[in-house]
Amino acid sequence: MFNLLVSGNGEWWENPPYTSTIDRFKEYSGAEAEAIDLARPETLRRLEEVPALLMYEVGAGGPHARVVRHGRIRNIVRRGHELAFTFEPDPEHAYLDRAEVLRTADQLGIAQFEQHRTHWAIKDGEIPAELIATGAAERAQRTVAVVAGEYVEARRDGRRREAGELAEELQNFPPTLDKALSLVPARILQQPTPELYPILGIEPRTPEGRNAVVAVVARHDNQQDLPADWPYSFVWFLDLYGSATETARLHAALEECAAHMIALGAGDGEAASSVEDIGYALWRCSRSPRLVGGLRREIAVLTDRLVRRQEMQGFWSEIREGVSRPGVRATALATVSLQRLGDDRYHDAIRKAVSWLITQVIPDVGALSRDAGGADPDVIATILAMEAIRRSDLVDDVPHVLAAGDAWLVAGQTVLGGWQAAPWAENFVAATVLEYLARQNEMLPQVDGFLLMARDFFRKAEELQLEGGANNRRLAAIATVHAVEMFLYGLFERREDLALSAFRENGTETLGPREALRALQDALQRIGVLQAPQRLSYRDNLSALVGRRDGIIHRAHEISEAELGDGMKHARRFIEKYARSLLDLNLLQ
């Protein structure tokens, strides 16, 4: 025999002593309850000898509504229409999770309806030992991560009622970055959204990565609520997570992106596409090496059009209801696109745009509107303006602007960790916000130095590779080696713990790429990042490319398309790997 007390007041079991009305005493009880009679107070002592579960109704609110207390009832006294008592928690298993209790509801004899009714039942049998074993001596803290995890599990298992309760509990947590990140799995469960998977840390070419491909491809093949810009998401995703089995789909989506960008560049005058549309397409391309490489000509056309349309004050204008006005979202899109895709040719244009964007922050809000002078904050304009500032040479001058913008973004999430910005789907907007908030340290400020040179050398190599021709291949190989060399020198400059310098002892000559690679390997072994005889990743491949570069410079050797492609592939992988792991930078974005 054991007691089961259920209350619909989500705070009832938080403040002893406790009471229960006699009109619902013994409801849903078993045969053993017949020996308990309120007319014979001495029989109530029997209830103090058996275990008790104090539970809240399913659907009750309160911070601990999902906690079930396990212990013994003491000092039962009748006072008019109530029974008053105290409660002695079990010293080792005082707190159970209600979900665990309800999973054994049949074994406990707990009917469906009584889970929603305040009462005191006296049940036959015993509480299963395996259920008691799940309890803890201290009440587990209901953190947002714990609640979000339970919510995802309930959604995955189709327990809609429980998921609804957990959603209500999540509303009690304030908006934080952790809350939004904890709810990303629920968003993916609701709809496979390509941009969300990397935020979870799901790696390509793993079982989890393959499951992601299966889910996204199924959505693609079923045409399941695909947005108009789906091809950009699909190419980016398949390039990151896909395999040879998705090649045809990737190429088809790439062609759709090319057709869209060609159409954007076709009109002139009044028929010209809006800056927002052009900037948005370039921004989407800039996130994907495959799109950048495959659509370089289309990107060049649109970038040229974009630059020519910038106003002297630094902003880009948009036509709204027949009136031209400075566009904040348009300017933010254009600026970030130039930062990600361009080189130092656009330094002045970017600086003017960022300087103007800083002046468009809404006072006492921290966000920016879609157009200049607007009072309604715009999520996309704010995200991209903050990114533009972080990537600019003004980043150290306006930390207060960045702090206010980031705070507004975090506070502006929905109760279930999302963000809304028409016309985009909430999951895509959430991914965009979270990518910015979680990875803002990876953004390279546009300040002269070795790392910026490394990025621009590699971009030039990609352009030359695309143009083709024997001499362009030679120049691309030379630029790629310089990119690796500049990256190494920038790494030495930023990581003082490596105790390395780009220069020889005379202070004027640089090490050169081969010696710098060897020095980095020795330093990483010394500080424990590499365990000897473990070698630096891609070192042999890069040494081979340096040898081909030397042959080009000193003997006019040629380099084939395959040799150049192989060398650039390994150079990219090397820079991306060590930029992330040693500098926390996405250098080649």
Image: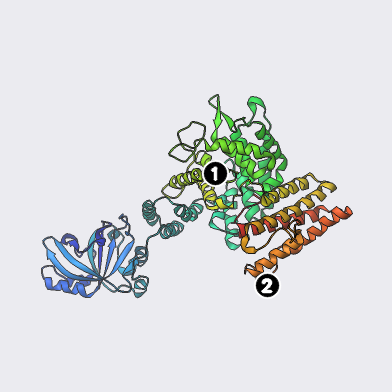
Neighbour tally class for label 1: few under 14, some 14-19, many 20 plus, Cα within 10 Å: few
> Percent position (x, y) of residue 113?
29, 58
On the question of residue 334 being in view, the answer is no
Q: Amino acid at mark 2?
A: Ala
On the question of residue 167 being in view, the answer is yes
Residue 295 shown left or right of residue 101 in the figure: right
Residue 478 shown left or right of residue 587 in the figure: right
Residue 236 shown left or right of residue 294 in the figure: left
Considering the numbered disc 2 on the image, is that residue within a helix, a strand or a loop? loop
Q: What is the number of callouts on the image?
A: 2
Q: Amino acid at mark 1?
A: Asp
Residue highlighted by disc 1: 397
Residue highlighted by disc 2: 532
Sequence order check: which comes first, mark 2 or mark 1?
1
The span from disc 2 to disc 1 (Cα, nearest Å) is 43 Å
* Residue at image point 58% right, 33% down: 315
> Percent position (x, y) of residue 538?
72, 62
Front-lying residue, 508 or 232? 508
Quadrant position of residue 514? bottom right
